[in-house]
Amino acid sequence: RKEVEQDPGPFNVPEGATVAFNCTYSNSASQSFFWYRQDCRKEPKLLMSVYSSGNEDGRFTAQLNRASQYISLLIRDSKLSDSATYLCVVMGNSGGSNYKLTFGKGTLLTVNP
Amino acid sequence: GAVVSQHPSWVICKSGTSVKIECRSLDFQATTMFWYRQFPKQSLMLMATSNEGSKATYEQGVEKDKFLINHASLTLSTLTVTSAHPEDSSFYICSARAIRNEQFFGPGTRLTVL
């Protein structure tokens, strides 16, 4: 089983649509979870951290279910500028080399006018 | 979010030369920085973890003598690709760990070895 597995995509949606990304991780000891977005030929940019209580930032909502080792990202009212690759990212335990991030392969989203 | 800079943003060099890439955290101190490599249409691959004041930890399959890492201060880590060859051509990205374990990435360095 891959360490971090995401929907393979790609997703093509019209402007205004709601899009949901799913992600599962294999290491139950993982401590921190994030969603990043990466535009073509650019670096990843942190979109939001993900907490067990769930968190929302404007049109973006992230959820974490530790029991099922599942992470999700919901984008409401999608905009053209949301077009990017969305990366599910997991970090191990704190301390030592466990700060390292494990990336999913990413899901490409294209929002069409 | 926190700002991480990387320099140079792109470099073209001849085979056999060495290339040094700098990564700086501009508005925070980072005891841990990371170096990644990304080939076209592939995921980021962690190369090494750079800890301030100590030796870097390399991932399996990454040659430590070829990819020299120095983390001399809390705001600067450098990666030197020694005796670069065409197969080293890639997009090299650093990241710095901030509070709450969030990592912020530099804009990347596109290396082309002729």
Image: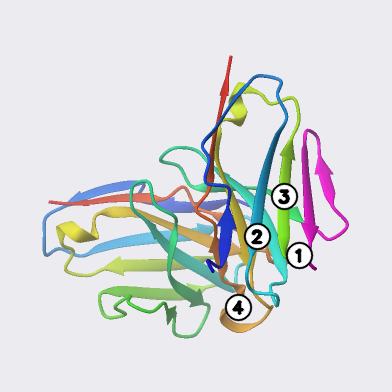
**Residue range (magenta):** A51-68
Residue on which the image places disc 4: A98
Residues under numbered marks 1 and 3 in contact, where contact means CB atoms less than 8 Å apart? no
Q: Position of residue B77 (x, y in %)?
A: 45, 68
**C-alpha distance separating marks 2 and 1:** 8 Å
Residue A72 numbered tag: 3
Residue A62 belongs to magenta span: yes
Query: As shown in the figure, which amino acid type bears the numbered disc 4?
Result: Asn
Q: Nearer the viewer, mark 1 or mark 4?
A: 1
Is tag 3's residue or tag 2's residue first in the polypeptide sequence?
Answer: 2
Q: Position of residue A111 (x, y in %)?
A: 58, 24
Is residue B5 visible in this depiction of the protein? Answer: yes
Is tag 4's residue or tag 2's residue first in the polypeptide sequence?
Answer: 2
The residue at 29%/78% (across/down) is B63
Residue B84 falls in image quadrant: bottom left
Report the side of B15 relative to A25 (left or right). Answer: left
Q: Position of residue A30 (x, y in %)?
A: 69, 72
User: Which type of secondary structure does the marked residue at label 1 adopt?
Assistant: loop
The residue at 61%/30% (across/down) is A82
Is tag 3's residue or tag 4's residue first in the polypeptide sequence?
Answer: 3
* In the rendered image, residues at marks 3 and 2 fall on the same chain: yes
User: Which type of secondary structure does the marked residue at label 2 adopt?
Assistant: strand
Residues under numbered marks 3 and 2 in contact, where contact means CB atoms less than 8 Å apart? no
Graded by Cα atoms within 10 Å as few (under 14), some (14 to 19) or many (20 or more), the crowding at tag 3 reads: many
Q: Nearer the viewer, residue B89 or A11?
A: A11
Is residue B28 visible in this depiction of the protein? Answer: no
Query: As shown in the figure, which amino acid type bears the numbered disc 2?
Result: Thr
Report the side of A111 relative to B90 (left or right). Answer: right
Query: As shown in the figure, which amino acid type bears the numbered disc 1?
Result: Ser
